[in-house]
Image: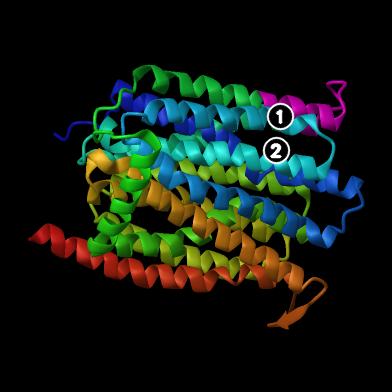
Amino acid sequence: MKEKFKLTALERSWVLYDIGNSAFILMVTTLIPLFFNALASAANVNEDLHLSYLGYANSVATVLVALIGPICGAIADQKRKKPLFMLCACLGMLGCAALGMTSHWLVFLGIFVVARVGFSSSLVFYDAMLPEITTEERMDKVSTSGYAFGYIGSVIPFIVCLVLVLGHDAFGMSQGSAMTVAFLITALWWLGCTLPLVRRYHQTAFVEEAGPVLDAFRQLGRTLRDARKEKHIFLYLLAFFFFIDGVYTIIDMATAYGAALGLDTTGLLLALLLTQFVAFPCSILFGRLSSRYDAGLLIKVSIVAYILIVCFGVFLMYQWQFWVLAVLVGMFQGGIQALSRSYMGKIIPADRSGEYFGLMDICGKGASFVGTMLISVVSQLTAGTQVVIFGMKLQNENIAISSLILLLGVGYVLFCKADKLNKERTAV
């Protein structure tokens, strides 16, 4: 009889951080775009530009993380992973708590960038812990558990925040005050879920240090050279850059996209809440499937699914279509993210996980930058434009989202080549 999979105490603490930070990212994809739209509208900012400005803010944050991530990763491998993780996580939490303390849309975007940088930078160290907190055989299941419980766990503070914001009159509060409390609740939840990992994690794989900053640059240079020599790693990172673009962009811009099309905001929030509930069992399912089927095959299936999802999203016009989109995204979102993370963890040396996950973060954040920037620019350039396809009038936002299809297609082709190389390498 096959033994039931059970997380260790350290693995549970690692998964718990996913539950904490996922509450923030759920706010980013739901309430933050709506709150920003309210602030921008109050300042008489052109409604056609709301999606563009929020996209630019996301792009600035991703560029900053892409620049500092590899350096932080290299330093982390010098037995500094835990303190740097704590620093970045605290920056994200403080930024999250401060989001509700301004009424100016531009200041709000500035604080949002700081919070995103802290959040995203903490994930460089968090992901790099994976090869240390578990074994290679358990890596796929532990990684998918992180995303799965992150999705379902983040729903708890989100429902509290949603009730508070939508029913602010019943609580004798203005909507602005309710949002301030909601951001504070999210930050405290994030903090509480971080403490067990901080207490239990101790870095076991590291390289000898020569000088913190100078040696970090030397390590980064060496990692870049090694990545180019190790073709299987280089091709995987390049493929990841393209296919994760569609995933991150859809996550970041879903609510802003729906709101720009004039869909009901409450319906958008409830649909994205549904995404969390769908993503939980589907992420667990991907973890179980990874023990039966090759992880590379599951990633390929997920990329193809995302191409079809984007095609469906291009013709999104009605509220019911957004609900369908939310379910489809939930089915594959956690699986492709978790398996991409564990796939990387299997093909790199554990003592240099910080460096390589730093490079992976460049690819992920670079892709997110390309996606959000591409949508923002195309949306702005085609503002006021309507195109009729199959008798359906597509707005500039619909046109902009179609650009993700090409990037996902390129990612699929490159990943097929990378996966083939990895299979040949392990077969030797």
Check disc 1 and report the residue beneath it.
Answer: 98
| Image marks 2 and 1: residues in contact by CB distance under 8 Å | yes
Name the colouring of the figure.
rainbow
Q: Which tag, 2 or 1, sits closer to the chain's start? A: 1
Q: Distance between the residues labelled 2 and 1?
A: 7 Å
Observer-nearest of 224 and 407: 224
Which residue lies under the disc numbered 2? Answer: 111
Residue at horizontal 45 percent and vertical 72 percent from the top:
409
Q: Which mark is residue 21?
A: none
Q: Of helix, strand and loop, which one carries label 2?
A: helix
Q: In this view, does 128 lie to the left or right of 402?
A: left
In this orientation, which residue lies closer to the viewer: 297 or 378?
A: 378
Q: Give the range drawn in magenta.
A: 163-184
**276 relative position to 50: left or right:** left
Type of amino acid under label 1: Ala
Horizontal side of 353 relative to 17 (left or right) equals left
Identify residue type, mark 2. Answer: Ile
